[in-house]
Amino acid sequence: MRTRSSTTYRRFYLTTPLLVMGLFQSVAAAEVGSSTDAVAEGAISAIDQHWSAERYKTRRETVRGFQLPLGKIKKINGSWRLSAFEPLSGALQRITWQIDGIPVVEVAESVAGPLAESSQLMFSCESRACGNASEWASRVYQERLLYGRDEYQRYFAFRTEGGVWITLFSAARTADRQYLHIDVVTPD
């Protein structure tokens, strides 16, 4: 008799190489193609194709002075602020996936690894080293859905050769409420 957890781990170990392979293929196409956000599109496509991910929300908008986090969120002079950020203007694409069946941090880290090979990792943190999880959800993302327990919080900020910024954030309240969020900022 197979337990749920052994089936889950078997699925993870069988599908994670496919996720990574899909991301590497997308990155290889990005190097050949002329699109400045092909690396980001490769990461999005890899998450979309992962068996555990279901798109929850997608949004596109134009931003001015968008604060892309490059440091933890902490209390400064009595109010919560990012300790470091890059102000950006351009096109912002935000996508949130619900992750089911495996820990969201495993999916986040399996996407971040190939991204680090195809772009420059500018900042990363995990758990309490990122700061207060509820402040990330409310102040950085303005999305209560992304509030979660500190131990499932991961954040990665990458910059591609073309100047596109890609951030990856994971959050989980429970095993049934796990989310992976990506922001892609294409500067003007």
Image: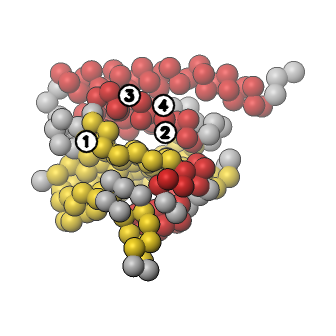
Residue indicated by mark 3: 114
Amino acid on which disc 1 is placed: Arg
Label 1 crowd (10 A; few <14 / some 14-19 / many >=20): many
The Cα atoms of the two marked residues, 3 and 2, are separated by: 11 Å
Instruction: Identify the secondary structure beneath mark 2.
Output: helix
State yes or no: discs 4 and 2 in contact (Cβ < 8 Å): yes
Disc on res. 159? 1
Residue indicated by mark 2: 108
In this rendered view, identify the residue nearer to me: 187 or 72: 72
Q: Which of marks 3 and 1 is nearer the N terminus?
A: 3
Q: Which colour scheme is used?
A: secondary structure
* Residue 46 percent coordinates (x, y): 42, 31
Amino acid on which disc 4 is placed: Ser
Amino acid on which disc 2 is placed: Ala
Q: Earlier in the sequence, mark 1 or mark 4?
A: 4
Label 2 crowd (10 A; few <14 / some 14-19 / many >=20): many
Amino acid on which disc 3 is placed: Pro
Q: Is residue 107 above or below residue 142?
A: above
Instruction: Identify the secondary structure beneath mark 1.
Output: strand
Residue at the image position 35 percent from the left and 32 percent from the top: 115
State yes or no: discs 1 and 2 in contact (Cβ < 8 Å): no
Residue indicated by mark 4: 110
The Cα atoms of the two marked residues, 3 and 1, are separated by: 13 Å
Residue at the image position 41 percent from the left and 58 percent from the top: 72
* In this rendering, position of residue 70 left or right of residue 112: left
State yes or no: discs 4 and 3 in contact (Cβ < 8 Å): no
